[in-house]
Image: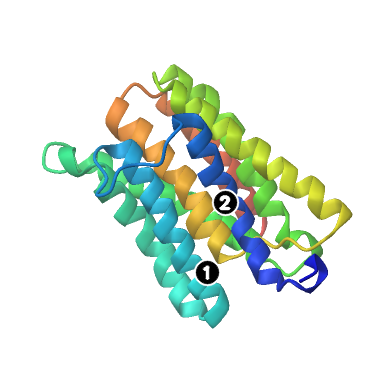
Amino acid sequence: MRWGRVDRRWYDLLIPLGFFLSYWLTYNRLPSFPPVGAVNKVFYLAAVGSILGVATEWTGSRRLGQLLLAAMPVASAAYIGDTIALAQPLDLVVAALAGAAALYALHREADYPDEGSGLRPAIMLAVASAGFAPIAFMGASSSSLQLSLGVAFGIAGIVVGHLSRPNYRFGWASLLGGAAGMMAVAQTVALITRKIDLLALAVLLLLFLVSSACRV
């Protein structure tokens, strides 16, 4: 089969695959199952999101996509922060709302009817991943620093490849798998290490919200 004949919807898996590769290179292993600890949970959240994203993309169900878009941040925050749910429920609510805002902004960019809608959300995610790397490092998570930079460089490679062969499009798998995977990484650093610079994280979140607001 030649690459030229591959259905474009399969290219949507490039960002999730880049996330999994970065995860493996960072931790030098695949996580245990059932997962123990937030780091292992991140991998499986991204995996489930990728599968659901592919299903949404191939069924063409916009309603399913929007339902998952709302559910993923809540499920991710609750799953990662299950050990602190009773003691600090407000932290989980804030983490879920911040994740939902970021995912919605990316979805809004991808859904915008212009030629850049397929690539612009990927670039935003790459910039945000690179921007989160030093925040993770200051939050005492060097592994999240490596993972974030790996995702950013992986997306940069996808963008360069797209410029020579424009096949990539930021779809549901990229959103619910790759972007939600990075959201889970951020939630892990915020909820588990609890040493994150909240002001820096809030400024980074503006990357998503300002662009989305400009579309109104």
Left or right side of 48 for 89: left
Label 2 secondary element: helix
Measured as percent of width and height from the top left, residue 33 is found at 28, 48
**What's the amino acid at mark 2?**
Leu
Please name whichever residue, 163 or 204, is drawn nearer the observer in this view of the structure.
163
Which residue position is annotated with label 2? Answer: 17
The answer to which of 16 and 175 lies nearer the viewer is 16
- Asked whether the residues under the numbered discs 1 and 2 touch, taking CB atoms below 8 Å apart as contact, a structural biologist would say no
Q: Mark 1 is on which residue type?
A: Val
Percent position (x, y) of residue 152? 63, 37
Residue 27 is left or right of residue 119, and the answer is left
Please tell me which residue is depicted at 41% across the width and 67% down the height of the picture.
Answer: 68
Mark identifier at residue 54: 1
Residue under the point 39% across and 18% down: 140
Q: Position of residue 132 (x, y in %)?
A: 53, 31
Secondary element at tag 1: helix
Q: Position of residue 92 (x, y in %)?
A: 26, 44
Outermost left residue: 86
- The answer for how far apart the CA atoms under marks 1 and 2 are is 12 Å
Question: For residue 57, what is the image quadrant?
Answer: bottom right
